[in-house]
Amino acid sequence: MKSEKSPKRRSSDSRKKKAELLDELRVLRKQRTELADENRKLNQVIKEREADGKADASDSDQVEKYFGQFIDPKDAQTFRKHSLKILNSVVNSMPDIVYRLNQNGEIVFINETIRNYGYEPDELLGKNIFDIVHPDDIEKARYRINERRTGRRKTQMLELRLIRKDRTPVPFEIRTKGIQDLPIFLISAEGLYSTEFPRAETFIGTQGVARDITEFKLTTAELALAMERLRAVLDAVPGYVSWVSSDLTYIGVNKQLAAEFGKTPEDFEGQKVGFLRGGEDFINFTQDFLRTGNAHEVREVKIKVQPKMKFYIVAARKYLGNQAAVFVGIDISDRIAAEKALEKYQMNLEEQIAERTQELAIANKMLKAEIAERKKREEELLRASRLESIGLLAGGIAHDFNNILTAILGNISIAKRKTASRDPIFNPLDVAEKATARAQELANQLLTFANGGAPVKKTASIGDLIKHSAMFALRGSNVSCQFDIPDELWKADIDVNQVNQVLNNLVINSVQAMPDGGQIEISAENCHVNTRNTLGLPSGRYLKICILDHGSGIPKDHLSKVFDPYFTTKVGGSGLGLAMVYSIMKKHKGRVTLDSDIGEGTTATLFFPAAEPVKKKPKHKKTTRIPESKSRILVMDDEILVRTTLDYMLRDLGYDVTTVVNGMETIEKYQSAISENQPYDLVILDLTIPGGLGGVETARRLLEIDPDVPIVLSSGYSDEPVMADYKRYGFSGYIPKPYKINVLEKIVGDLLK
């Protein structure tokens, strides 16, 4: 930061600067005095010449007499000749008339340029300057051509007309192109004084310069006349004309264009293109044309002129070295209206044929669509019928099979629990347990086709599930996988186990289609399905998953059959894989499609409905049940094998167990226990009881008696509403048959905590 000067320093600088200015002022005063002396001497020479009346004395004599005062007599003669030669050459070579007047306005000097107008310089000496001024301009020139003022007030840019020697009068308006008959001058003049400071008594005359501007005036007048004619022509054009500079500023417009906007041409001058609304097309055309190198261009533009839109054909051409352009627009609104009317008329002429043709085309299209839709529905019905047949069979088998497996798996798990791992019997038990688990998977597959195979849905993020399922299915194969799954993928209401099964089946099919190895591409995205989709889905938000392989592909005639149960082309295949995929997707209210090209590969596409955002509900505080040291459990199941197995497993876990056959007996036992002040701490209910109260109705009645009792649903054949949302029916937990003792231990233990 600069430091401020001290007051003493500033005072010293000021005094120094003032001294320098005083020195310069003294020099200027001295120079002014010397120039004033020389001017007085020159004026004195002129006065002497005028007093003596030496009309024949030449300018050379006056100059010689003047300069002779300052020249050494030895060199005076040579200098005089040289100076006069230069002076005469300079003054007489000037294209302007140089003159000098005395105090009476009489000419005392005029250069040879006056000869161009028929005069000799000597014949004008002594004559008044107004003798050669046009009569109409004398009043205007009276106090200005013989100017007395000097400095800023002197005459400048005074326009006058002079008379030629032959006294030909010069008219005010232009009547001929002959420049010689029209001498018009621009006068500059100032007064001369015999003293340094002008006073009235020291005025000695006027000196001035007259420049011939006749050609300029003629050109200007002709240009104005030409512009007036051009304006008249352009104003008569049945369209608009505008001149625009390269900076998009209006230079001018014709009356037609101005009138369209209720303006005058003057309102447009200097305004930017587009200062009025409604001309966006013209603005764009102007900008494009001036930016390009095209010299000319034609375009159709629209200009909105209240109260309607008008159409113009605009031709543009650049001029002045591309610094400006002229635009000529012809209104074609009537033509376009006529074309539209003609088009409408032609359409009316062909209306009957076109209408009939269109009706036939629409009918044909509708018929084809109806046939295709009917065929598709027939295929769907046939597929659904097959699935329903399998479902009826599978449902009954799976229910009984799972009850049997519950007894087998439960007892095996109890036996394993009581057998040390070193015991020889442990390994056979372990193998039997695994075989039972495999049988359980087969039963679950059968349930997928049954009405009881409804998904147990929960809102889940499907992105991680896709990756885990695919990588699990690819283990040990020579196929890799590329994922394209965004983080912002929507959540879906799905049965995680069933969707995992779908993904596993599809990935395994892709691996089997590429025996020599390769890469599978799996992508997922959010999408919106509209009402006109060909998938038969309701409109809304969906998750779209694509699984693409580069295998051998599926023949066209097989594509319509791949989802049919037991259809397979694989050796040793069951034909249930894709049928199960189809069934699971349908129960999730989604769709699965396959697109394939032989030798190129196959793409499986899945559509899952996206979950709706759910507002968090406030949690209601429940009464905590504090069980006794040995909790009491009530079990209801119609199968004696299941009741016996459950009784054995629960007692082995340390619980006091009571088993019943049906719902009525369950309610009676529970009420009796309450009346004896020995209530049950937990109830396990089978879902389906032939000929009696099932699990849902029994649970409802128990909750009426004791709203806080925890109830576990157990079933080998689940009903869709209950499986999908068992908590809605009052159940605290769900345990599908068959199950091992450790699974039972965890569920019961968690609920009794």
Image: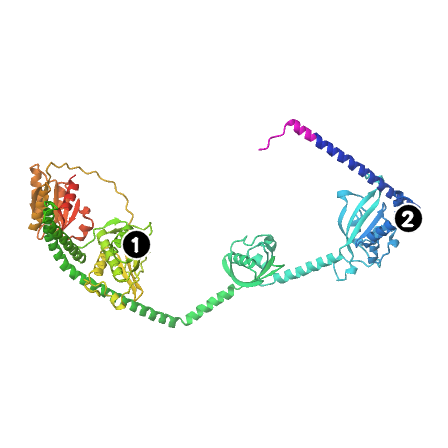
In this orientation, which residue lies closer to the viewer: 124 or 677?
Answer: 677
Left or right position of 227 against 653: right
Three-letter code, disc 2: Gln
Give 518 or 713, whichever is nearer the viewer. 518
The first of marks 2 and 1 along the sequence is: 2
The correct choice, above or below, for 69 with respect to 3 in the image is: below
Residue 264: image location, x then y, percent: 59, 55
Q: Position of residue 263 (x, y in %)?
A: 57, 54
Q: Is residue 539 visible?
A: no
Disc number at residue 77? 2
Magenta stretch, residue numbers: 1-14
Q: Is residue 547 above or below residue 51?
A: below
Rendered location of residue 380, percent (x, y): 23, 63
Labels 2 & 1 near each other (Cβ < 8 A): no
Towards the viewer: 165 or 478: 478
- Please give the name of the residue rendered at 75% of the width and 43% of the height, measured from the top-left corner: 152
Q: Is residue 74 magenta?
A: no
Among the 4 quarters of the image, the one containing residue 112: bottom right
- Residue 148, relative to residue 606: is it above or below? above
